[in-house]
Image (spheres, helix red, strand yellow):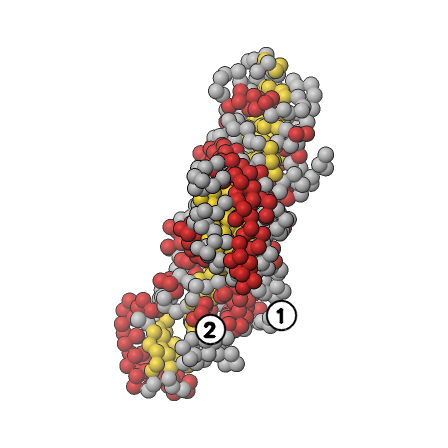
Amino acid sequence: MTTARPSGLDGIFRPRSVAVVGASRREGSIGRQVVANLIASGFQGPVYPVNPKAEVVLSVPAFPSVRAIRGPVDLAVLVVPPDAVLRAAEECGKKGVKGLVVITAGFREIGGVGIEREEKLKAIARRYRMRVIGPNCMGIINTEPEFACNASFSATPPPKGSVAMVSQSGALGEAILADAAQAGLGVAMFASVGNRVDVTAADLVAYWGDDDTVKVILLYLETVGEAAEFVQVVRQVARKKPVIAVKSGRSDAGAMAASSHTGSIAGADVAADTLLQQCGVLRVDNFRDMFALAQALLHQPPPSGRRMVVITNAGGPGILATDALVGLGMEMAPIASATEKALRRVLPVEASVHNPIDLIASANAERYRAALRIVAKDKAVDGFVVLFVSPIMIDAAAVAQAIVDETRELQKPVLACVMGRQRGDEALQILQDAGIPVFRYPEDAATTLRLMCRRHRWLERRPVKLPTLKVSKATAEKLFKTQAGDGWLPAATAEAILQAYGVPFAPGRRVTSAEAAVGAAHKLGFPVVLKAEAAALLHKSEHRAVRTGLRSGDEVFAAAQDLLERLGKQFGDVTLQVQAHAEGHREVLLGMTRDARYGPLYAAGLGGVQVELMRDVAIRVGPLDGGDPGEMFSSLKGKALLGEFRGAPAADLDAAVEALLRLQRLVDDFPRIAEVEVNPFILAARGRRSVAVDCRMRVQG
């Protein structure tokens, strides 16, 4: 027997008795279906239908109220009208009920009175220390024989298994259970959490993380909820067992209104996707991929590397598998010469012994067996994709058995793809019974392998300690105090604050006249850059507010006059910044935008005026550790541009990494900062000075 858990959810998932408040005799009603499911699931304790107008429900004696039940009640399922839920919950609290499953809708989702009703339900639950699933949910299921409990109105009883599922949608919960059963995926526990008045996805992940009957956790999320709690819990649990999620809501039109480059790029879905990845959650696009990945992780070891081998009896599927694997970031394993020679001895001359290994259409079980036995010994292979297109003259079941026999002792993942009809169903069953996932198309197998690789890399990664950074918090505090109210800080103030935290800037001077600009240029030394600054001038390049490569006083004077006259008409008071030319040769962006749901989102990417066009920016949810910034730059599509390029030396990425960590320290020390961006940060070669040349900062609160 599993011991009681500190999260207090045993009263919901392992109750000794269940009351169904709102049980009904009416065919097709939810109240009747819940009682029927409890009985059909083989629940070991008493089921108490509560209905003041019925003496019996489904041959079980009914009670007029929870108070009238003589024995203790661990779990109560509420299926009463919305205006009766609070009274029923109060009665359950007085009875000593440990957990409520509130199936009834009509709460926060309808607004107005529903919000008020939900707050009152939350208060009742806290007063009586009851854990609550819902409201507006489809219930919970536990298939564990000792505690078998289907307290839901699901029409599909799931087969017993090792997967736990949580759904934020009741309607989708029914579909998830039906599809899981069809995919042959056994369920240990299921919960539809609805409005999450109390129990959240994080609570369930924590509960299942300590449960030995649960091997894989599946999530359907519409919102992450309390991000800090979710991160803390899921990051720990994902190290013990896989967590897979389908997260809906990929669009975020609100991001288009963001003023900074960072804010416009770091939309809601980017933030959610990043948060899930950082927690070790494997995000998939659909439930088909979710179930396939769950099956693979239940029965197959994760690959220790990205080098895959494809073994096929048809060239076309082999090419498709190769394209899919390479396109998803994996590699085709280099077959050792000894392996090729051994294959050549057992395969027809027409066969290909290069990866993908093509056994040709006449390949039977013995040919598959011989090839697999040889390739299994090759240490350069991290994972196998075995394809079989079943010709009419080949026994597919025998081929499947050969695949099972020759890979049984492998400590590497084996995924199969069976295409064809000749004993195809039998072959599929043989493979599945042996724990080898079977896919209809090779692209699906490649998608699953990619996510298995991602899990292995995440498990291998360990947090990197933050470096010690010397900063001047007192200086920054004084500068913030000079700025009252919310909004964008003057550029000079934002720059000074960042410099107080050790972010280096190119030398510069701010002036208000063309004559003063010329004088500043002579003191800084030519060539110089001239910029216009104004309160509403956020994107300088859009207004031709930057002039570069000015090499004489005359050029500076003419440029200054143009900026002052032209932009002064549009923006009012305009200040000029004369800045020394930065010697660096690569531009990157460093930034942060504070998301109301997920907290600080940090950005690092290729910078300059094309940042939003190229959108080659990596996002991480804070806090960053010492290894995150480097990994962010390494993940960029254009990372090669930061290395040696056309005779230019590699950029000093260490300078950008340190600057981003300094920016994070500033954001941590001053929660008022809503957005901050350094763009461009110009990287010099190693040993030279990398500097920022522009920044912006917005404060609020």
Q: Is residue 163 above or below residue 230?
A: above
- Across and down, in percent, residue 573 comes to 34, 70
Q: Which of the image's four quarters has the N terminus?
A: top right
Q: Residue at x 63, y 24 (%)?
A: 42
Q: Is residue 226 above or below residue 35?
A: below
* Total number of numbered discs in the rendering: 2
Discs 1, 2 touching: Cβ within 8 Å? no
Q: CA distance from mark 1 to mark 2?
A: 27 Å
Front position in the image: 449 or 337? 337
User: What type is the residue that disc 2 sits on?
Assistant: Gly
- Across and down, in percent, residue 177 comes to 52, 34
> Mark 1: few, some, or many residues within 10 Å (few <14, many ≥20)?
few
Q: Earlier in the sequence, mark 1 or mark 2?
A: 1
Q: Residue at x 59, y 48 (%)?
A: 407
Q: Which residue is mark 2?
A: 643
Q: Which residue is mark 1?
A: 468
Say what secondary structure mark 1 lies in: loop
Q: Is residue 475 left or right of residue 351?
A: right
Front position in the image: 445 or 688? 445
Residue 80 visible in image: no
The label shown at residue 253 is none
Q: Is residue 184 left or right of residue 43?
A: left
Q: Quadrant of residue 389?
A: top left
